[in-house]
Amino acid sequence: MNLLPRRYHRIKQVLDKRQPDLTVLTEDVHKPHNLSAIIRTCDAVGILDVHTINKTDEFPTFSQVSQGSDKWIFLHTHPDIRTAINYLKHKNFKIYAAHFTDQSLDYREIDYTQPTAILLGAEKWGVSEEAANLVDGNIIIPMLGMVQSLNVSVAAAVILFEAQRQRLAKKMYDTSRLDATIYHKILFEWSYPTLAREYQKKEVNYPSLGENGEIIS
């Protein structure tokens, strides 16, 4: 039942670069292809957790756009925007909404090396006024053409790759930044998802893993 060492080391390589203090919160992003594209970008820049609320529809099913990246992201749903923002603030995140106001900052002016959450609003309406008033600041992507805004998933990619650029410059991807216990838990679940579910049903701890991913009794 052991997995191939190459697969195990690839999983470790990805997990080693996960950023527990960078996240995205979506508010009523209900089109599956948009949410899936956002999640795919989150995986690409090393985000581990994504948060979402959706008051208008049932939570959308991931489309093929995600290319399976939803397997490597933990998605947390919240009942309303105030609850979601309060949760993130309690975790010491600074929250910036992609939202145009007279006080909005250029997205490149934000220090994304600090614990940061990016709030993205609905495809048609954007961030709600309630959300815009609850966050720590609003950011914009300067537009030089006729259009006033980007597609929500494109905006997410632009902002998140700026965050990645800043974090790479600070060498925040060079060593694992996850708590050791959490790291082992995720590593086992990603390496042996079926077996992990069996351990969860039995309510017993996961076994240790060897250098090449072999299970150590």
Image: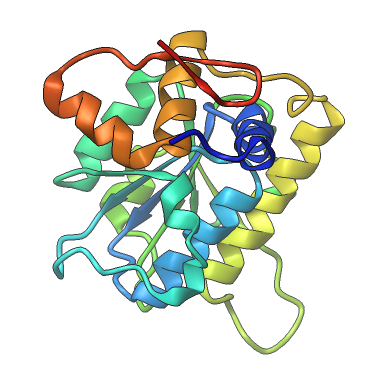
In the shown orientation, is residue 10 left or right of residue 25? right
Q: Quadrant of the C terminus?
A: top left
Rendered view: 112 above or below 29: above
Q: Who is closer to the viewer here, 136 or 154? A: 154
Name the residue: 65% across, 18% down: 211
List the single residue furthest toward the bottom.
146
Residue 181 visible to an observer of this rendering: yes
Q: Position of residue 106 (x, y in %)?
A: 69, 52
Within the image, what quadrant is residue 181 found in? top left
Q: Position of residue 201 (x, y in %)?
A: 13, 28
Rendered view: 76 above or below 35: above
Q: Who is closer to the viewer here, 16 or 205? A: 205
In the shown orientation, is residue 107 left or right of residue 27? right
Q: Position of residue 16 (x, y in %)?
A: 65, 27
Q: Who is closer to the viewer here, 27 or 161? A: 161
Within the image, what quadrant is residue 186 found in? top left
In the shown orientation, is residue 181 left or right of residue 78? right
Rendered view: 110 above or below 59: above
Within the image, what quadrant is residue 76 found in? top left
Name the residue: 50% across, 61% down: 38
Q: Position of residue 170 (x, y in %)?
A: 82, 25
Rendered view: 117 above or below 42: above
Name the residue: 53% across, 68% down: 153
Q: Quadrant of the N terminus?
A: top left
